[in-house]
Structure formats: C-alpha cells, structure tokens
Image: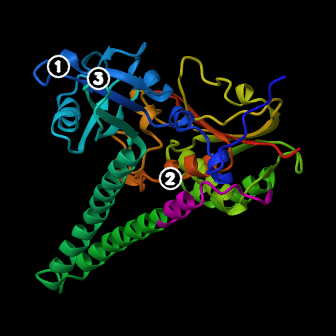
C-alpha cells in the first residue's frame, strides 16, 4: 500500500500550512477577473479567462472565454483595462450600475506577465464603494441643510438688531415686538442645535446595543405628565390605553426611550386641531405583524423601519394617533429624513427642526425595534414604534 509523499526537505512548516492562492481569490468578496487579449484594435478580442464567484455573480459571467464588452460596457472601464493590457501600466475607473438600488464601483487594473501563448494579460478588481459614496452625499446634504436651517433665524436676528439700532430704537412698542420675535428665533436656533447634538450622539452609539431595563409604561407616563400642560394650552386631550406596569419591560436606554415617546406624543399634540384628542396606546406581547396592524380605514401605510426578527419574539408597541391634517401618500417615505418637512407644514406654529422623526428612527434602530406610519388626509396620522419585549 502506497503512502503519502513526504514533504520536500526545503519546505518550512509555514509553507506547508499556507492555503492555495486560488482558494484565497475564490473566497474574496470583491469581484476579481483576469482579462486576456491579442489585438489592440479588436474590442471583441478582450476575453475573461478567469472570474471569481463574486465577479461571476455581479457581471453574470457564464464561463471562461466570455467577451469583456458583454459583461461591462462602460468606456472608461474598458480604457483602464486596455491601459494595463497594452500600455502595461495600472489603470483606474469608476462607474455606477443601475437596478433597484444604484451601486458605485471603483475599478482598478494591473498588467500581468504575458501568457504562455503570448496573449496580453491584465488583472481587474472591483471594489463596492456604494456605502462610502452614500455617506459622502449624506454628509454634504447634512451640512447644506444644517447651514440653511441656521441661516434663516440668524438672518432674522441680524435684521431685527439692525432695525433696533436704527429708527426703531426709540419706539417702545416696536422694540417689545421685535424682541419677542428675536427671542423666538433664538429659541429655534437653540432647539436645532440641541437636536443636532442629540442626533450626532445617537448615531455615534447606534451600533452599541443598550444594556439597561426600561418599563415602557412608566416611561410613557412620565412623558404624558410632562406634556399634559402643553396639550391643555392647545386644547388637546390625551387619551391613554396602557398596559399594566411591569408587563412592558424592554432592554433599552431610558433617556432615549423617553425621547421616542416625547417626540411621537409631542408631534401628535402639535398637529391636532383645537379640542382634538390624541390617542396613546401601549400594548405588550404582540408579534411584529400585530404591532403594525392597520387602524385607519383606507389610509396610506408605510414601514419606516423593520426589525430583524428572531423566532417567537414578542414586542411592546407604542402607538400615537392624532386627528390632524394627515399626510399625503407620496410624502411618507421621506418623513424620517433629516430636516424633511411636508409641503404646507413648513411655517407657522407647527414649525419644528425637522429632526424629530430622524431621532426616533435611529433610537428605534439601536433598540432593534420597528417604526411605521399610517395617515389619511384630512383625518389624521398614526405613528407606531415597537420594541422587543424583555422576557
């Protein structure tokens, strides 16, 4: 019976344990291809002689010998490949792919030694930069929006200060009225800065799971106690239907859970008509589907955030419903974007910072929860946040 061949005398233990390079490339998450070509003038001559699984899936390559132009038609990418094939220099290009979601790819090419049959060879590697590009756009949009939101009250303050220094400095009535407006604008700036700082802190720790225990019933009761005077000033009644204390325990950061409840209830009060009623419901032990069961006949519905479900998991649901103007269906997908406010609701006494629902969404996401909205124009809006119940 034959035995396994002994290792070569000059092989080290590290070399014996080293995995095959082919297996390493096959397992890479980035698409990797080797391109071969003979004739620089013939575009159809560029053929894929190797593609790892990631490249085959992305570019729908059926097998070796596929022409490169049938997989990628972007001119700059093809130029980068030619630079490496026939110019023997490294190339780089960027391109976007369409589909359900646009993806941004960075392509890098490198020349390789000639094949045994004399064909030119080039290595091509694609890197998915969709997330980094999206983050860049978000940062740019965030800075532009924040600057705009701060510039408006600042310009107002500057204008009134100049007026008070000029012809209105001796007009007591005008001075009192202008100072009131200035105080309101300064308050708006302060709220915006507070919300920006709060959102920044939330996003910074969003990937860190909370560790505390929160009775959602007690948290909601604290918020209701704080908002009842404000609701009374607006002639709004808070109607509650809450689970028993101790039955709605969740793992969470209590301060952040209070922010969720306060933003949702405060929003409902803000958009309720005079003598209106805000309904606040808290129910424990629901499935995710039960938590987002429709409550408004013929309303537009959208899930703004869906949790990753674990088998048999139960949730605690907080639902806030108002009888305000409602929101048209086309506006629902953007409600949790930073600074977004529905057309027609960007001025007047309801003016906010446009960050409240973004804060709610990020906090809910950190707590592995879900967020949904229902609305009927002219009848009102319902927001539902739900969190995994602590068993």
Q: Pointer 3 and pointer 2: residues touching (CB < 8 Å)?
A: no
How far, Cα to Cα, is label 2 from label 1? Answer: 54 Å
x, y percent for residue 366:
64, 50
Q: Is residue 298 left or right of residue 328?
A: right
Residue on which the image places disc 1: 43
Q: Residue at x 59, y 55 (%)?
A: 206
Q: Is residue 212 left or right of residue 89?
A: right
Judge depth for marks 2 and 1 and give the one in front.
1
Q: Residue at x 23, y 33 (%)?
A: 81
Task: Tell me, yes or no, whether the highlighted magenta stretch contains residue 207.
Answer: yes
Q: How many C-alpha atoms fall within 10 Å of the one at disc 3: few (<14), some, or many (≥20)?
A: few
- Could one spot residue 269 in this view of the protein? no
State which quarter of the image contains the C terminus. Answer: top right
| Vertical arrangement, residue 140 with respect to residue 113, above or below | below
- Could one spot residue 336 in this view of the protein? yes
Judge depth for marks 3 and 2 and give the one in front.
3
Mark with earlier residue (2, 1): 1
Residue on which the image places disc 2: 356
Q: Pointer 2 and pointer 1: residues touching (CB < 8 Å)?
A: no
How far, Cα to Cα, is label 3 from label 1? Answer: 19 Å
Name the foreground residue: 292 vs 58. 58
Mark with earlier residue (3, 2): 3
Q: Residue at x 77, y 59 (%)?
A: 211
Residue on which the image places disc 3: 117
Q: Which mark is residue 3?
A: none
Q: Is residue 195 left or right of residue 117?
A: right
Element under disc 2: helix
Q: How many C-alpha atoms fall within 10 Å of the one at disc 2: few (<14), some, or many (≥20)?
A: many
x, y percent for residue 20:
58, 37
Name the foreground residue: 82 vs 381. 82
| Vertical arrangement, residue 38 with respect to residue 12, above or below | above
């Amino acid at each position: 019976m034959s035995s396994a061949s002994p290792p070569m005398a000059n092989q080290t233990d590290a070399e014996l344990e080293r995995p095959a390079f082919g297996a390493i490339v096959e397992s890479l998450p980035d698409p990797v291809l080797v391109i071969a070509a003979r004739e620089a003038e013939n575009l159809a001559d560029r053929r894929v002689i190797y593609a790892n699984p990631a490249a085959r899936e992305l570019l729908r390559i059926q097998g070796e010998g596929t022409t490169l132009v049938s997989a990628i038609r972007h001119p700059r990418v093809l130029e980068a490949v030619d630079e490496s094939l026939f110019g023997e220099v490294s190339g780089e290009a960027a391109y976007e792919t369409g589909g359900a979601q646009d993806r941004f790819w960075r392509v890098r090419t490198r020349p390789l030694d000639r094949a045994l049959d004399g064909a030119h060879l080039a290595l091509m590697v694609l890197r998915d930069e969709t997330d980094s590009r999206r983050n860049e756009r978000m940062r740019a949009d965030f800075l532009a929006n924040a600057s705009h939101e701060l510039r408006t009250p600042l310009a107002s303050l500057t204008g009134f200060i100049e007026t008070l220094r000029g012809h209105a400095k001796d007009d007591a009535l005008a001075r009192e009225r202008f100072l009131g407006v200035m105080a309101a604008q300064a308050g708006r700036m302060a709220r915006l800065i507070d919300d920006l700082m709060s959102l920044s802190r939330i996003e910074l720790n969003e990937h860190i799971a909370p560790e505390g225990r929160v009775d959602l019933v007690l948290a909601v009761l604290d918020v209701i106690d704080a908002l009842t005077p404000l609701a009374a000033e607006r002639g709004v009644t808070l109607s509650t239907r809450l689970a028993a204390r101790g039955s709605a325990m969740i793992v969470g950061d209590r301060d952040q859970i209070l922010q969720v409840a306060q933003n949702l209830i405060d929003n409902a009060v803000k958009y309720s008509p005079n003598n209106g009623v805000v309904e606040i419901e808290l129910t424990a032990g629901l499935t995710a589907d039960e938590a987002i069961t429709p409550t408004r006949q013929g309303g537009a519905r959208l899930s703004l955030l869906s949790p990753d479900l674990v088998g048999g998991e139960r949730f605690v649901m907080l639902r806030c419903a108002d009888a305000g103007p409602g929101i048209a269906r086309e506006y629902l997908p953007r409600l949790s974007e930073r600074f977004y406010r529905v057309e027609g609701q960007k001025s007047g006494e309801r003016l906010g910072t446009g960050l409240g629902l973004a804060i709610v969404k990020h906090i809910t996401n950190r707590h592995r929860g879900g967020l949904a909205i229902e609305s009927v124009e002219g009848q009102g809006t319902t927001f539902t946040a739900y969190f995994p119940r602590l068993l």
